[in-house]
Image: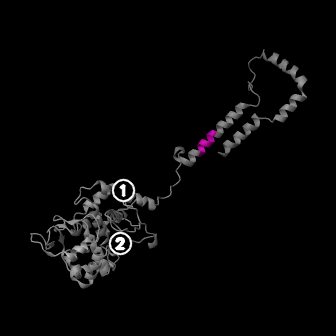
């Protein structure tokens, strides 16, 4: 580039003598120059053809054109070096790694929300409940004593963990999110599954769930052993053992149970059958209201032990659901949430945020969580 500039400068000096010098010479030698010019003009008519050609115009424009061409060529070379070095056989400058920001994750959220709206032919009209279950089960394997499990890893991708009985049917949720992963390959499965759970809650008119990215995907060596997720056939001691292993108290345990306001059970998955509420795709405190206000009886059928409402016999409750009414400590929170939906939403949001972050070595502090806009905002 610098060489081309010098060439152009020399051409300009040659091609453009100053106006002052040209005018001075013309005035000083005006009379003699006329005769000399005629003499040279006459001789030129009988030239032998061996003389070097001179420029038609004064000032050597050929040099100027050469210089300009060199300058343009140099500029093109510099541009190629800067923007397309591979054209010159050089290695390009390494690009800075892509660092996703809030708006990038909001785009992922929007994509999930759009798919939820478009694919309304699943179960009761939404993939939302099964997306929440995927995020819940990916996180609920955490063990605070060993620091293993949790949402960091997405190890349910592998057969040892994906085949656990508690995870039956979750392939539907993982497959649902695959097109999102293809559209946004930079997001990890671990972050995507949790973001899917966040989107599911908010798109089913639940509370805002602050989100923090930073989970990494791990290999099958990090799969957790079976038995870390709740067993619906157990009693209150089992509930406290499972949730206590993750670090939750009674209040959070009951709040998290409120997720049963969504979705339904399937005989080909858990063995149980039926929805918990009359609005299984909308998150409300109806789950707690029904537990307190309705009468429940054992369902007479060939399946595992479960309860049905006496009035319509269309709703169901699991043995673990009935435990949060029987146990005195659990019951006081069940009654609170049955009376106050805002209290439920507040405690549910706090508990879910904690659940979704279990076992993740975040780089960003808690005060840098993001809150995404839903399709209702």
Label 2 or label 1, whichever comes before in sequence order: 1
Query: Dot 2, crowdedness within 10 Å: few (<14), some or many (≥20)?
Result: many
Q: Is residue 319 above or below residue 262?
A: below
> Measured from the top left, where is residue 155 in percent x and y?
31, 66
Q: Nearer the viewer, mark 2 or mark 1?
A: 2
Which mark is on residue 349? 2
**Which one is in front, 204 or 116?**
204
> Measured from the top left, where is residue 161 in percent x and y?
26, 67
Q: Is residue 14 above or below residue 344?
A: above
In the shown orientation, is residue 246 left or right of residue 89? left
**Which one is in front, 270 or 187?**
270
Question: Label 2 vs label 1: CA separation?
Answer: 22 Å
Q: Quadrant of residue 293?
A: bottom left
The residue depicted at 34 percent of the width and 58 percent of the height is 113
CB within 8 Å, label 2 to label 1: no
Q: Is residue 11 among the parts visible in the rendering?
A: yes
Q: Quadrant of residue 324?
A: bottom left
| Dominant SS type (magenta) | helix
> Measured from the top left, where is residue 278 in percent x and y?
22, 66
Q: Is residue 365 among the parts visible in the rendering?
A: no
Q: Which residues are magenta?
A: 72-78
In the shown orientation, is residue 34 left or right of residue 92? right
Number of marks in picture? 2
- Farthest residue, direction bottom: 328
Q: Is residue 330 magenta?
A: no
In the shown orientation, is residue 123 left or right of residue 43? left
Which mark is on residue 111? 1
Q: Is residue 76 magenta?
A: yes
The residue depicted at 22 percent of the width and 80 percent of the height is 325
């Amino acid at each position: 580039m610098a060489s081309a500039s010098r060439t152009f400068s020399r051409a300009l000096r040659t091609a453009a003598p100053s106006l002052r010098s040209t005018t001075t010479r013309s005035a000083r030698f005006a009379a003699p120059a006329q005769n000399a010019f005629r003499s040279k003009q006459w001789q030129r008519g009988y030239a032998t053809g061996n003389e070097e050609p001179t420029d038609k115009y004064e000032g050597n424009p050929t040099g100027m054109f050469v210089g300009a061409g060199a300058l343009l060529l140099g500029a093109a070379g510099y541009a190629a070096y800067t923007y397309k070095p591979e054209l010159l056989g050089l290695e390009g400058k390494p690009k800075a790694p892509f660092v996703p920001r809030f708006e990038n994750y909001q785009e992922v959220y929007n994509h999930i929300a759009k798919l939820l709206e478009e694919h309304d032919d699943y179960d009761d009209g939404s993939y939302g409940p099964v997306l929440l279950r995927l995020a819940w089960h990916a996180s609920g394997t955490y063990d605070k004593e060993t620091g293993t499990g949790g949402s960091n890893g997405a190890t349910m991708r592998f057969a040892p963990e994906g085949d656990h009985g508690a995870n039956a049917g979750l392939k539907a949720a993982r497959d649902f999110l695959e097109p999102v992963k293809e559209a946004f390959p930079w997001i990890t499965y671990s972050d995507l599954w949790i973001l899917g759970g966040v989107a599911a809650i908010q798109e089913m008119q639940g509370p805002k769930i602050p989100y923090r990215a930073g989970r990494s995907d791990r290999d099958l060596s990090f799969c957790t052993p079976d038995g870390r997720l709740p067993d619906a056939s157990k009693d209150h001691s089992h509930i406290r053992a499972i949730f206590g292993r993750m670090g939750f108290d009674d209040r959070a345990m009951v709040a998290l149970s409120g997720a049963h306001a969504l979705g339904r059970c399937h005989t080909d998955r858990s063995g149980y059958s039926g929805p918990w509420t009359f609005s299984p795709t909308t998150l409300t405190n109806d789950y707690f209201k029904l537990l307190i206000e309705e009468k429940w009886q054992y369902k007479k059928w060939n399946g595992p032990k479960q309860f049905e409402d006496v009035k319509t016999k269309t709703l169901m409750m699991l043995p673990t659901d009935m435990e949060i009414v029987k146990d005195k400590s659990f019951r006081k929170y069940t009654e609170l949430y049955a009376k106050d939906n805002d209290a439920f939403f507040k405690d549910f949001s706090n508990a879910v945020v904690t659940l979704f972050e279990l076992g993740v070595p975040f780089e960003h502090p808690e005060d840098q969580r993001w809150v995404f806009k839903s399709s209702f905002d």
